[in-house]
Amino acid sequence: MDFLKVLFTIILYLNVLIAIASFIFAFILLRRTKGNAIYFNFGMATLFLGLWITSIPLIFLKFTEPVNIFLTNTTFLFGIWILQYFLIFTIYFPTPHLKRKNIWVPLLYLLTLLISFSIFIPNLYTVRAVSDFPYLYVKFNAAGLTIYTLYFIALAAASFKNLIYKYRQSDGIFKIQLKKIILGTGIAVAANLVLSITIYYFTEFDFSPIGALFTFAVLAYIYSILFGKRESI
């Protein structure tokens, strides 16, 4: 067994462990959601992270190619909802109890639902998905991939806009929290934009299990900020 095969095998097993951890984090957050939009939206982002990471190892269970294509599409589905809820999280952080109406949130849900439905239009996104443990080879329709990429970038840009604006308006502990979240989010977005989305323009080799590690690490980092003894919300 060559080094690359050993490495990807380890990464896939790590994906299983971090999926379990994501569900645990989501459960803890969602139990605290009463009157707290921060915990709800970050909890939902973490829940979809768990679903996304779970769907990756499932592809290697020797299903037929149509099932593999469906599972590959679900990774895109869950991925966009992670960012959807993270964007809403940035709207409310760091003051969840302030009464605020945001006219963009309903529109955001509508747009994300439209993208979600489009993912399952035959051959618009995944055209081919073949697993050869621990590797996955996928081919995407450039049109669908471009639609998804542009929407992903739009959600990420809006999230950064919210965080940077609030960073400039904040002071004290909130400013420190926001700085950490901005840095962590930048790492996760950049890693997944490259490893889980745009890389498919150049290769059919799937790197999303590595992207999952980056996303989990950053969300776990933000989770530690939310529940830190000195930085609690």
Image (spheres, rainbow, N blue to C red):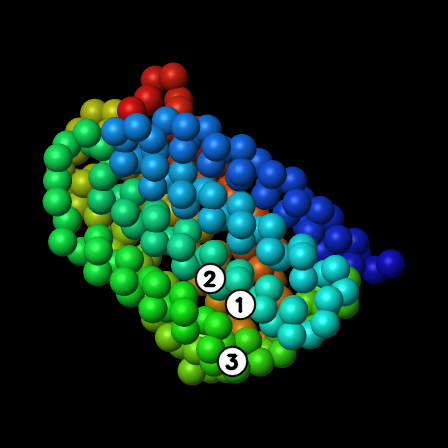
| Secondary-structure class at tag 2 | helix
Disc 3 vs disc 2: which is toward the camera? 3
Q: Which of marks 3 and 1 is nearer the N terminus?
A: 1
- Residue beneath disc 3: 122
Is residue 172 shown left or right of residue 24?
A: left
Mark 3 and mark 1: Cα distance apart in space: 10 Å
Q: What residue type is labelled 3?
A: Pro
- Residue beneath disc 2: 77
Is residue 228 shown left or right of residue 13?
A: left
Q: Which of marks 3 and 2 is nearer the N terminus?
A: 2
Q: Which mark is residue 73?
A: 1
**49 or 187, nearer to the observer:** 49
Q: What residue type is labelled 2?
A: Leu
Image x and y of residue 176, in percent: 28, 31
Is the Cβ of the residue at disc 2 closer than 8 Å to that at disc 1? yes
Tally of numbered discs: 3
**66 or 219, nearer to the observer:** 66
Mark 2 and mark 1: Cα distance apart in space: 6 Å
